[in-house]
Image (cartoon, rainbow, N blue to C red):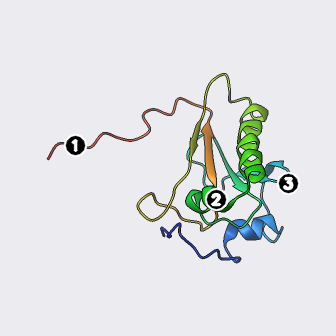
Amino acid sequence: MPVSGLGPYDDSNIFARILRGEIPSRRVFEDAFALAFHDIAPQAPLHVLVIPTGRYVSLADFSSRASDAEIAGFWRAVGAVARTLELEAPGYRVLANMGEHAGQEVPHFHVHLFGGRPLGRMLVAPTES
C-alpha cells in the first residue's frame, strides 16, 4: 500500500528492522552511509535496494535533512554497488519512489537498482483518449 513520503519516520518499518538486523537480508554492500541488499520480489534479473543508514522517510526528506557527507556517501554507495555487481558496462536503472502517486511502499528512503537485461522504456507513454 502506498505511503506518504512526508513522514513522520516509523522505526518499525521493514527497512529499519533490516538495518537493526531483526530481519535477515541478502546483503551485497554495507558501510557507514548505506546498506544494499537483494529485493525479495525482484522485478528484473538483478534487483537490489540501497537504503541510507539514517532515519529518512523519502528522497524529499533525505535531500532536505541529510548532511552533505550522508548524501555524498549514499550516492557513492549506489555507484559502488553497481560496480560490484558489474552493471556499468551493460547499464542499469536507478529508481526512487516518493509518496503515494509514485507508489512508495516503505517509509524509509531507498533506491531500486535494476539490471541484468534490457529494461525498455522507463514509462509507458499515455494513450490518447
Question: Of residues 115 and 32, which is closer to you in this image?
Answer: 32
Residues under numbered marks 3 and 1 in contact, where contact means CB atoms less than 8 Å apart: no
**Residue 113 sits in quarter:** top right
Q: Name the residue beneath numbered marker 3.
A: 32
Q: Name the residue beneath numbered marker 2.
A: 62
Q: Secondary structure at mark 3?
A: loop
Image side of residue 27 versus residue 121, left or right: right
Viewer-nearest of labels 2 and 3?
2
Residue ranking furthest to the left: 129
Q: Spatial distance from mark 2 to mark 3, Cα to Cα?
A: 16 Å
Q: Residues within 10 Å of mark 2 (few under 14, many from 20)?
A: some
Q: Name the residue beneath numbered marker 1.
A: 127
Query: Which residue: 68% across, 69% down?
Result: 14
Amino acid type, label 3? Ala
Picture coordinates of residue 85 (x, y %)?
75, 34
Question: Of residues 68 and 45, which is closer to you in this image?
Answer: 68
Q: Is residue 114 visible?
A: yes
Q: Is residue 109 visible?
A: no
Residues under numbered marks 2 and 3 in contact, where contact means CB atoms less than 8 Å apart: no
Query: Which residue: 66% across, 56% down?
Result: 40
Q: Spatial distance from mark 3 to mark 1, Cα to Cα?
A: 45 Å
Query: Mark 2 or mark 1, which is nearer the start of the sequence?
Result: 2
Query: Which residue: 68% across, 30% down?
Result: 87
Query: Mark 3 or mark 2, which is nearer the start of the sequence?
Result: 3
Image side of residue 32 versus residue 92, left or right: right
How many labels were placed on the picture?
3
Query: Which residue: 54% across, 65% down?
Result: 105
